Image (cartoon, rainbow, N blue to C red):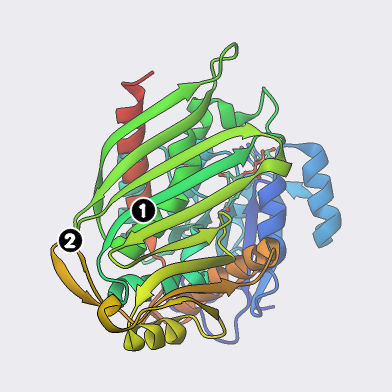
Amino acid sequence: MTSSAYSASAPVPPTKSLGIGAVGAGGFGLFALQQFLQISGVHLVGMAGTHREAAVAMMRRFGVPEIVEMDALLADPEVDLIYIATPPSLHYPQALAALQAGKHVICEKPLALVIEEADELVALAREKNLLCIANLMQRYNPLFESVRSVVESRVLGECLHGFFENYASDEGLRPDHWFWDRAMSGGIFIEHGVHFFDLFEGWLGPGSVVAAQRALRPGSGVEEQVQCTVRYDRGPLVNFHHSFTQPSRLDRQEFRLLFERGTLTLEEWVPVRGRIRAVVNEEQTRTLLEIFPGARLDVLKGLGGSDRAARGRFKELDLAQEVELTFGAGDDKMRRYCELLRDVFADQLAWLRDRSHARKITEQNGRDSVAMAVAATKLANLSA
Ligand SMILES: NC(=O)c1ccc[n+]([C@@H]2O[C@H](COP(=O)([O-])OP(=O)(O)OC[C@H]3O[C@@H](n4cnc5c(N)ncnc54)[C@H](O)[C@@H]3O)[C@@H](O)[C@H]2O)c1
């Protein structure tokens, strides 16, 4: 392992192994690091963490001899990149300190709790030519590209409406967990919603929050449900609903996109499978199968003769059949999740080695997803 005779703002030479310093040895830090460290050309230099039991577990897992303070990681020339997996209110000060110390940053979502802080981080990273992304790994899902192709190709016509229903579990979130403390988490839109604002922006482009509400749990008063409506500039209205209210056995998430000639549904919050129910002509059937290779096509109804002619939104349509397309990989959410983490890290590392590499997510995704989440939070605050 070579350490640095190179400047952090310059491309990382192919022969150099990238040294990682990890800050925050909790549940997700352990999960993500196990994936990042599988990418060749990186190694773990050291770890900082405040919760003794979790930190000791991390030490055992990675064979790290001791837990140090974050300052020691920042002062270590062998550390090129700081991975931050602490509670959200620490992301801004820790990312800022890391950038000021000349380290690249991969930060758990959200990048910051307020937009001014996200802007400051992005500006500093640009000025110093350093990496500073939020770990928004959803766009690395192959289904992200497939849905984008359905939208962009207009194979089902225009996208008119979207829905993301996130009926999540709170089983692992004790009453004293930082998640419920909005000063630490920012609230559900900021802590969690950023993943989905980023995903839908990748599909539909820019948009603005036009309505938002929140609901508090009777008794404790914690925020347990939030929802908002985003109007995308290209037309569709999308409803986002997040609730953390149930045992994990009931965990259920569904994305739905309504198009002029059909509906696309994805299941799980890291989507792994889905289906399209649509009325299509011959070319459109072929295009769908090109976008979803290996999908199962069930023809539910053949439309012939006068049945071919139909109307919708004042438009004449020519249809050949009603179909259901089923695609994806059963219940393999955790495998897909691991794969996305490896992919996000490999993509960012490729950019560190060659700045002409086009990344799937950049600093801007972290910043823009916080902007939308903050706008939703402000509107929701007016409701309760
Ligand atoms: N990208 C994803 O899909 C995803 C999924 C889950 C969680 N997360 C994010 O990961 C982050 C951590 O979540 P978690 O579930 O692992 O929480 P956690 O509470 O399990 O872990 C946080 C850890 O940070 C440590 N910590 C607190 N203050 C510290 C400090 N000053 N210095 C060093 N360590 C400190 C705590 O001791 C704890 O071990 C959050 O931002 C969360 O939003 C991301």
Residue 181 appearing in the image: yes
Mark 1 residue's CB less than 8 Å from ligand 1:
no
List x then y, in percent, for residue 297.
Answer: 52, 80
Q: Is 286 left or right of 39, judged from the image as shown?
A: left
| Residue ranking furthest to the top | 219
The residue drawn where x is 63% and y is 58% is 21
List x then y, in percent, for residue 114.
Answer: 36, 37
Closest to the observer: 39 or 17?
39
Specify the quadrant of the image occupied by residue 308. Answer: bottom left
Specify the quadrant of the image occupied by residue 296. Answer: bottom right
Q: Which mark is residue 162?
A: 1
Q: Nearer the viewer, mark 2 or mark 1?
A: 2
The residue drawn where x is 50% and y is 75% is 347
Q: Which mark is residue 313?
A: 2
List x then y, in percent, for residue 166.
Answer: 52, 44
Residue type at the position of mark 1: Gly
- Going from N to C along the chain, the mark reached first, 2 or 1, is 1
List x then y, in percent, for residue 183.
Answer: 49, 26
| Residue ranking furthest to the front | 306
The residue drawn where x is 19% and y is 55% is 233
Q: Which quadrant of the frame does ligand 1 lie within?
A: top right
Please say if 62 is above or below 299.
Answer: above
Q: Which mark is residue 194?
A: none
Closest to the observer: 249 or 60?
249
SS at badge 1? strand
Q: Which corner quadrant holds the N terminus?
A: bottom right
Disc 2 and disc 1: Cα gap in Å? 17 Å
Q: Which corner quadrant holds the C terminus?
A: top left
Residue type at the position of mark 2: Arg
SS at badge 2? loop
